Image: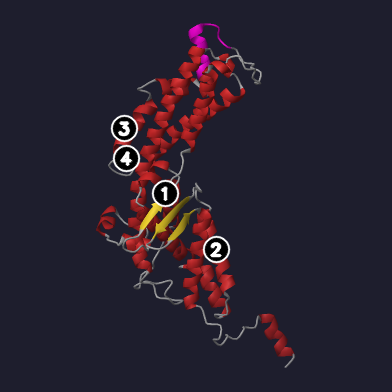
Amino acid sequence: MTLGASDSDAAMHTFDLAEIARVGRGDRVDVQQISDATQDLFDETLALVREELGDEAQNRPRERMARTEFVPQNRDLRSIFLLADALGSYDALNDLVNTYSPGQVMSEEIGDKARRAALDDKELRKLLEYQEQIQTALKSANAYLRDVAIDEFNREELHQLHEIIILAKQRARELNDILGIHYLHAVEHVVEELSAFRDQIHSVERSIDGIFLVNSEVLFVPTNRLVECVNILFQAVGNAWLAKNIDGVLLLAARNLIIEVTAFHSYYGKLQIYDLFRKTGGNVTVQSVGARIRGEIRRLFNACKKDNKLVLTRVMENAERDFEISVEALQEEAARNAIEQVKIFMPKEDAPKAARKKNLFRRVLGWFFK
């Protein structure tokens, strides 16, 4: 069995979401609400423009960097130049003022699909690139208005810039919502896929031989696919729309599955851990195995593109418990889980130790000094 079953296999797999999330009847899982950093920066940028439009700001002295570029004197050309300069490029300006710009048309088309199913890699990449384009224009405008030339705009140009920023803010919010809907589908797929794999993990014998064979078949976890699942989770928890709309039980289940499967991946079939037992005749410490396991888990999480953080709160009848989704928290719990599983088949401390093998040098010395 490999991680990454076909869609038909995933559809046939059934699982108990509450059991995976380890929540009882009547419990609920609250998801921490997070702010959208892009929307916050839009608000900050709009505040700069609105402050400049205020009567009390008209004659206020302002420190600014010296301008060295040529500014057109023609009224129309001047307005376009300043607006494009504020946003970073003419392309960014055209995309925001044109209702039928390629970026806007593309996001609307892909958004329709995202409401029905998860996007493919190409579609997701296009949306992320468009989001980056808008964010770049926003950062440029914010820095421009703070440090360069806000006092070069007349009131009409400030009003135009104000309207463009509002339009860009709306597009950015819609784009973030589309991505949130996609990530919601993607997290559901991750839970389906990893829960099927979890069922196989539970059939593993707790023995040295058992960690290599399951039902006489080699059980294999493709590292690349597991990394993709981890990346999906961390991309998802950084999305403000998803945090407001996802079922907390589903997100907690995804967290638990990532920890369990990552833990299994860190020791199962790992030749270096097997060699520790084989070469030492079983005389291996928890510390040495733990170091190997932590190294495996660290390498896997080093491939993560995001380290977004989110807190889930399981609310029970008389108590609450927080669960953090972060690279640090998941790495630590996966390592603890893996070490506990390996300790099951490690020799007990009071078990007789295997005789230490003599190397060739010591055997030769023994022949001479009998």
Which badge, 4 or 3, comes first in the chain's sequence?
Answer: 3
Marks 4/3: CA–CA distance: 9 Å
Helix, strand, or loop for circle 4? helix
Which image quarter is the C terminus in? Answer: bottom right
Q: Which residue is mark 4?
A: 114
Depicted 259 relative to depicted 311: above or below: below
Residue 123 x %, y %: 37, 38
Which badge, 2 or 1, comes first in the chain's sequence?
Answer: 1
Amino acid type for the residue under numbered disc 4: Ala
Q: Which residue is mark 3?
A: 109
Q: Which residue is mark 2?
A: 294
Residue 25 x %, y %: 31, 63
Residue 355 x %, y %: 60, 86
Mark 3 closeness class: few <14, some 14–19, many ≥20 residues within 10 Å: few
Marks 1/3: CA–CA distance: 22 Å
Amino acid type for the residue under numbered disc 3: Glu
Q: Which residue is mark 1?
A: 232
Depicted 188 relative to depicted 240: above or below: below
State left or right for residue 12 relative to residue 78: left
**Residue 11 in sight in this render:** yes
